[in-house]
Image (cartoon, helix red, strand yellow):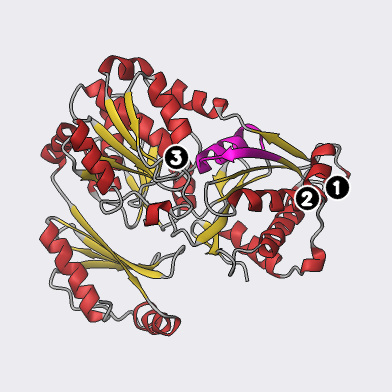
Amino acid sequence: MIEFGTGGWRAIIADGFTRENVRLLSQGLADRAWREHPGGRDAAQPPVIAMGYDRRFLSREATYWAAEVLAGNGVQCHLIDRSAPTPLVMFTTRELDCAYGMAVTASHNPALYNGIKVFTRGGRDADADTTAQLQDEINALTHDDVSSVATEVGVERGLIRVSTSFNDYIDAIIEQVDMQAIRDSALSIILDPMFGVARTCLETILVTARCQLEVINDRRDTLFGGKLPSPNVDTLRVLRQTVLDRGADLGIGTDGDADRLGIIDDRGNFLHPNQILVLLYHYLLTVKGWKGPVVRNLATTHLLDRVAAAHGEECFEVPVGFKHISAGMEAHGAIIGGESSGGLTVRGHIPGKDGIYAASLLVEAIAVSGKKLSELYADIVDEYGRLEMVETDFAFSDARKTELVAQLMQAHDLPPFGAAVEKVSWLDGCKVRFTNGGWVVIRFSGTEPVLRVFAEMPTLDEAQAVVDEVTAYYRLG
């Protein structure tokens, strides 16, 4: 069975992620594209689907498996035949006004996974209703329902159109960033694409802006150097040391498909994605003079709420999954939206997370301020105070998950927290808010078989104490 989570369909290679399942998914998407196409199959022009792939094992091959099925159904494919950041696929989907987009990637998941992200018209993450319907339609198909043609036949018929250019995407970012300010700053930057797809695009932007750039971990390695391709405090240790050794102004890490980022500041400190979000929202409000609210998911820092309130704006909370961020930004006219896992988007760019654009905007903020990144965040703390977050993941068996679901989600059995509880929400998992402004979220991941626990409190010790209470109560350790 093909199941869509918060970040598309992901499965273990050669177990769920197989050629036959890729073909079934592509057939279901082709059927859907034709069903929604103006004029149906009698239309003069077919629906168009943009496609791209990351550097994982079988990603390129799977993209062509999918293209052969789409072409076999008379759907035109615009295939980016190079390692492509997911935001490039979203951008292409929007610019070509495609019915759908497909990125073959498992994003930041371990190397044994691969998957497919599906985007709707405008380059948006497919919403929950769309993926639920698509999932049902795909799982009702059999292999006999799949139509396909050989790649060369699809190319000959004009149904598989191959390109390798990313210039329009890069130019769109350059047009929105103050390149002259970056040129004048002469910043020294270390880039760690984590063996993923960010190098070419981000390197082009930063070198064009005359940054002194050094790139590490840039070769293709389908095992990602033996690490999780997710930019966090543990996986960016080499980047941190390189920043310190070179005396660089900034270290930028991006995940496997470049839609998320992690930052090392000039002092070698890891800046949590929460801190980056706060920095950029504050920069847009106070320096660029933008006006508007911010959208965050329920597991993202409430420091954003403080910044918004201080400027007469509002912070809107949505469930986990970037499709909710995108929808919330559109609904509320927000200028920025993001999540604590490292994804963010800004008004005027694609309606999805983009680590390349986010990194470019952060470099602009540093250049315009004339300060070190560590100084910029210190200014934030001085003005709005400090909140500290602790995040932990717990793996479990199927039997243990059943027990946890029954105890937490059905019986609503919560620990006797030491902090006073103000409110409990069951919007997406469980979120407990405390009277001191802190909170804890307990929820099952939509992309991996883990239970995630996020706690944010006024101090790091208090946040860790809340996580420890959850761990002990549900016997997670």
300 drawn magenta:
no
Q: Secondary structure at mark 3?
A: loop
Between residue 360 and residue 241, name the one nearer to us.
241
Q: Which residue is mark 1?
A: 41
Pointer 2 or 3: first along the chain: 2
For residue 474, above or below residue 348: below
**Looking at the image, which residue is at 25% across and 33% down?**
250
Mark yes or no: residue 309 visible. no
The picture places residue 314, in percent across and down from the top left corner, at 31, 43
Q: Which residues are magenta?
A: 78-97
How many residues crowd mark 2 within 10 Å: few (<14), some (14–19), many (20+)? many
Q: Which residue is mark 3?
A: 354
Amino acid type at circle 2 is Trp
**Looking at the image, which residue is at 56% across and 36% down?**
91
Q: Which residue is mark 2?
A: 34
Between residue 202 and residue 383, name the one nearer to us.
202
Task: Give residue 78's quadrant in the image.
Answer: top right
Q: Quadrant of the C terminus?
A: bottom left
**Looking at the image, which residue is at 81% across and 64% down?**
145
